[in-house]
Amino acid sequence: MHVSTRIQSSEITVQLCKENEKNPKTDAGSLLFGHTFTDHMLRIDWNSKTGWNKPQITPLRPLTLHPAAKVFHYALELFEGMKAYRGFDNKIRLFRPDLNMKRMLSSAERLSLPLFDAEQLLECMKKLIKIDVDWIPEAKHNASLYIRPTLIGVEPTLGVTSSNDAILYVILSPVGAYFKTGIKPVKLIADPKNVRAWPGGSGNRKLGSNYAPTIAIQKENEKLGYQQIIWLFGDDHQLTEVGAMNLFVFLINENGEKELVTPPLDDGIILPGVTRISLLELARQWKEFKVSERKITMKEVKKALQEKRLLEIFGSGTACSVCPVGVIHFQNEDLIIPTMEHKEPLNIRFLNELSAIQYGKKSHPWAVEIC
């Protein structure tokens, strides 16, 4: 673990864009995820001898890195995904940003990248968001401002060792509604020959190296007509994640109880999602059905489906919030999941509850007002 001086938000310097340098804003209905960026960025440099430099907010600009920078050769890179929401009252809120900072610190520790003061980084991010606040779409568009904090090792030396130089930066991207044509269940493929993560690995951290190996597999499945992959693990085909989302199964168990199941975090192969823990906490507050963090296999899913006990399967994540599943292709068979066939689907209830908190319809401590 690196010993470093603290990031000091009070020392931040600000260089604003000139009016003629500002980017044109895109209509909220036309925004594609991650394609549009605001005018400014936050950058904080770090060195093992001097610690953290003063934070800087500058116009959005390219990074200049040496070809030997460790990020290019040894994947010393991590990131977070979070959002700012413009409420119906025009106030700007973050959703549980402390959990994103906790996960980012866990990722940094795993990669031997420098640690930081989470509260101070959040203060710097809030200043950046306030500067580019006009980029945050109105609540009526069901859109938001995606926030991407990133930490990379940039020491220009070859060799599999810790990086003595690092850059922490934050960029902002206005994003439109994830479901532009309404909520539609996705079709998934469950293929046991490919594994996303394994016990003792880094699947429970948000590292770029966890995502790159999934892209080719994702493209192959898209050609077959499936939007995402359910990542399986072990000879018993345990369900782990849906693409880059956490996974939930809602069923009537063999004891006749309604039960919400999501895979556990204890073996390190599941990313501890902010939306994941929020759904679990909401469900436990409701006290209407059993809530379990336990392993669940394709055998159990198939059996529940055959016995008409399977109610819903859905994914959760920052980008989509809650995403219903309609089909799972497994062992040459399409399993039709009745996720949206009920009068009041649980996934829609979760989606509406989160949206009410994020957009300020409902007062809640998870929504952190920043301006």
Image (tube, rainbow, N blue to C red):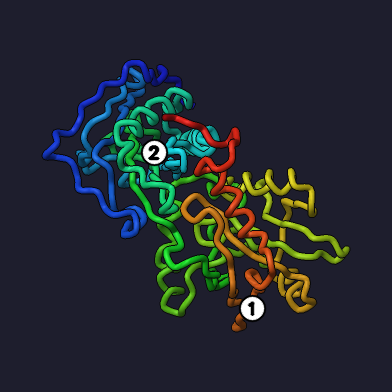
> Does the image show residue 155?
yes
Q: Amino acid at mark 2?
A: Pro
The residue at 50%/35% (across/down) is 97
The residue at 49%/49% (across/down) is 318
Q: Residue furthest left?
A: 20
Q: Position of residue 52 (x, y in %)?
A: 35, 21
Q: Secondary structure at mark 1?
A: strand
Q: Amino acid at mark 1?
A: Leu
Spatial separation of the CA atoms under disc 2 and disc 1: 38 Å
Mark earlier in primary sequence (2, 1) = 2
- Disc 2 packing (10 Å; few <14; some 14–19; many ≥20): many
Picture quadrant where residue 172 is located: top left
Relative to 92, say whether 183 is above or below.
below
- Disc 1 packing (10 Å; few <14; some 14–19; many ≥20): some
Q: Position of residue 276 (x, y in %)?
A: 61, 49
> Does the image show residue 103?
no
187 lies left or right of 309: left
Give the residue number, with chain letter if any, for mark 2: 149
Foreground of the two, 109 or 38: 38
Give me the disc on residue 230: none
Give the residue number, with chain letter if any, for mark 1: 335
Q: Position of residue 33 (x, y in %)?
A: 36, 56
91 lies left or right of 158: right
Foreground of the two, 6 or 127: 127
Q: Position of residue 226 (x, y in %)?
A: 49, 74
Picture quadrant where residue 193 is located: bottom right
The residue at 39%/47% (across/down) is 138
Q: Residue furthest bottom?
A: 332
Foreground of the two, 346 or 233: 346
Q: Are marks 2 and 1 in contact (CB under 8 Å)?
A: no
Which quadrant of the figure contains the C terminus? top left
Relative to 99, say whether 204 is above or below.
below
